[in-house]
Amino acid sequence: MSGSVDLGEKISILASAAKYDASCASSGSSGKGGKFGVSLPAGVCHSWTEDGRCVSLLKVLFSNSCRFDCAYCVNRASADVKRSSFTVQELVDLTCEFYRRNYIEGLFLSSGIFADPDIVMEKLIETAKTLRSQAGYGGYIHLKIIPGTGEKLIREAGLWADRLSVNIELPTEKSLQNLAPDKSGKMILGAMGNFSELNLEFEENRRKPRFLSCGKNTAPAFAPAGQSTQLIVGASAEDDRQIINLSSSLYRKFELRRVYYSAFIHPRAGDPRLPETPGPPLVREHRLYQADWLLRFYHFSAAEILGENEPFLDSHLDPKTAWALKHIDFFPIEINRADYETLLRIPGIGAKTARRVIETRRSRSLSFDGLRRLGAVLKRARYFITCGGSFIERPDDPLRIRRLLSDIDGAGLQLPLFEF
């Protein structure tokens, strides 16, 4: 399958083929130079942990040969691209060498579906197992679950990998049938369900007395970093409300750690099933990530973010500010009296700042300057709060506040580091 392609070219082909999978929160890195991959932008990517720490991952496909013909995929069966595959030993050696040189802290491994899904999954598992059991590798491993993989192999994958993910790709079964007819929503959700059941089984085992010895839990861990998935935004006709409702349901039913949103990028070779777009809808992707934060960290429900007559998120306002302006009667909030859940509703005050406010109030009252020092973004919060009964500005003109807080130029396409 891989012919006479040398290792350097394999890295170029299979790292580039993996770059469109957003489910490891990646961004390209040009590396530090060198013969193997580190100078290739797609070979080493960045992933961010939930506490904000940045880690580097080797992000590649095992193979970019694929039987499936998904319209949006650069590796689809009908695409005219150069094909290649790693061997298990090549990937093991490459990962260990990059790790020893401190180029990476982990591996993100997926694959095109070049054979029966179980056969493909076995190759990914063999790679992870060899890294752990023979090479003595203790770094992070993220494996992609191939749609159609059986429960037995998902169980084994979770014993060797830190995180597993299966990409749902599109929001509805109708869109999957249109753009990815070889895939099935039932099959994808079934894999997510298998993971959830296995995770529960392993957690229950870890609480049983026979696995407790000398104060240590000896039960095997199952994918301790959980599972994630990816949704492509803009390749099909679903609106933001459908996407947010789906994400909320996935978090609730399968306890996903993350849903990643990937702005649709039109492949070079066109397909009549795909929409004609001038470029990837990055603003829309950005707003969906912000809405996702509201679901995961700010205790908003999907219905609060977008109502029945609101199909799309506001392109000029972050969804938390948009909610606040639609519920202006909820404000102003007195900072020195509000509980944690109420603080989370204030634009410019995030989860970390809200916790700091609660802690600080145990010993003293807060002023606006004190609130700023705790991390509040007063540019946003000033219209929605009081401190000791005092205003910076009264929330008496929602249209004016909207005008002042709008991203008129569409700037800020990366997920902001500040709390909103």
Image (tube, rainbow, N blue to C red):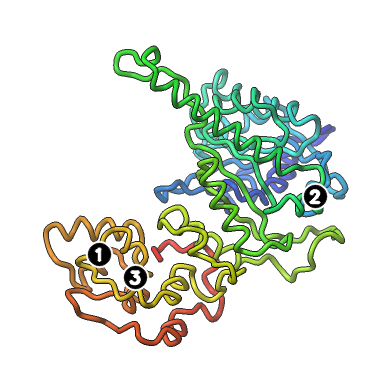
Q: Residue furthest left?
A: 363
Q: What amino acid type is highlighted by mark number 1?
A: Ala
Q: Identify the image quadrant of the C terminus.
A: bottom left
The residues tagged by marks 2 and 3 sit, at their Cα atoms, a distance apart of 45 Å
- Is there a contact, CB below 8 Å, between mark 2 and mark 3? no
Residue 77 in the image, given as x and y percentages of width and height: 85, 44
Q: Position of residue 89 (x, y in %)?
A: 67, 25
Q: Position of residue 402 (x, y in %)?
A: 45, 82
Q: Secondary structure at mark 2?
A: helix
Give the number of the disc on residue 377. Answer: 3
Mark sitting earlier along the chain (2/3): 2
Q: Which mark is residue 246?
A: none
- Neighbour tally class for label 1: few under 14, some 14-19, many 20 plus, Cα within 10 Å: some
Please state which amino acid type lies under the numbered disc 2: Gln
Residue at 18 percent of width and 72 percent of height: 367
Which residue is at a point 84% across and 32% down the rendered structure image?
A: 1
> In front: 390, or 241?
241
Residue drawn 43% across and 61% down?
417
Quarter of the image for residue 386 reads bottom left
The residue carrying mark 2 is 177
189 left or right, relative to 258: right
Give yes or no for contact between labels 1 and 2 (Cβ–Cβ under 8 Å): no
Q: Secondary structure at mark 3?
A: loop
Query: Residue 164 appears in which quarter of the rendering?
Result: top right
Residue position marked by numbered label 1 in the rendering: 338
Residue 28 in sight in this render:
no
Q: CA distance from mark 1 to mark 2?
A: 49 Å
**Residue 73: x %, y % from top left:** 77, 51
In the image, is residue 147 above or below residue 43?
Answer: above
